[in-house]
Image (spheres, grey):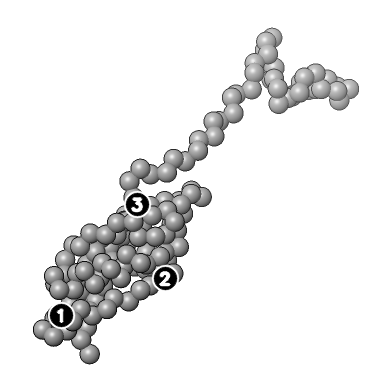
Amino acid sequence: MLPGGVVESGIPLLPAAVTTLAGDRFTPPPPKPAIVEPTPPTAPLQVSGGVQLAKLIKRVMPGYPSPARSTRVSGTVRLLAIIARDGHVRDLRVLSGHPLLQQAARDAVSQWVYSPTILSGQPVEVESPIDVIFELR
């Protein structure tokens, strides 16, 4: 008999994929590895503002609040956004910025839309910082 369970005539004794010959007994092939489906993360993934900005597909510019304009207030409002699986802003939290500018920044960014972030073929929520810059001209 030749290796692989084949007799000299070329006819297999048993299919090699089903069993193998080990001494005087047959042993089954090793089990196939289980296919593990990736599970989406339970918490939003943290991504940088630059990475998320590249995915922005709808941007609404904030209006400059009249009280801030009349008092010549300018600066950056830093927000932390949760972006849902469909790319819409789901939650916003102000991290810093002048109080006269914060609501205008929130109102504008809440309307932004991003292309969804995909992980292992599935859309996932992400958490990203967003800076809104107010400059008087």
Q: Quadrant of the N terminus?
A: top right
Residue under label 2: 58
The residue located at (35%, 60%) in the rendering is 89
Badge nearest the viewer, 1 or 3: 1
> What is the CA distance from the residue labelled 1 to the residue labelled 3?
34 Å
> What is the CA distance from the residue labelled 3 to the residue labelled 2?
21 Å
Q: Where is residue 48 in the image (x, y as percent from the top left)?
A: 32, 62
Q: Hey, which residue is sitting farthest top in the picture?
A: 24
Residue 119, compared with residue 32, is above or below; it is below
- Check residue 68 in the rendering and tell me which mark sits there, or answer none: 1
Q: Quadrant of residue 115?
A: bottom left
Tell me if residue 56 can be seen: yes
Does dot 3 land on a helix, a strand or a loop?
A: strand
Q: In which quarter of the image is the C terminus?
A: bottom left
Q: Quadrant of residue 54?
A: bottom left
The residue located at (86%, 25%) in the rendering is 10
Badge nearest the viewer, 3 or 2: 2
- Check residue 45 in the rendering and tell me which mark sits there, or answer none: 3
Near-viewer residue (18 or 64)? 64
Q: Position of residue 99 (x, y in %)?
A: 13, 70
Q: In which quarter of the image is residue 24?
A: top right
> What is the CA distance from the residue labelled 2 to the residue labelled 1?
25 Å
Q: Mark 3 vs mark 2: which is more N-terminal?
A: 3
Q: Mark 1 vs mark 3: which is more N-terminal?
A: 3
Q: What residue type is labelled 1?
A: Ala
Q: Are marks 1 and 3 in contact (CB under 8 Å)?
A: no
Residue 43, compared with residue 76, is above or below; it is above
Q: Are marks 3 and 2 in contact (CB under 8 Å)?
A: no
- Check residue 27 in the rendering and tell me which mark sits there, or answer none: none
Q: What residue type is labelled 2?
A: Lys
Near-viewer residue (127 or 5)? 127
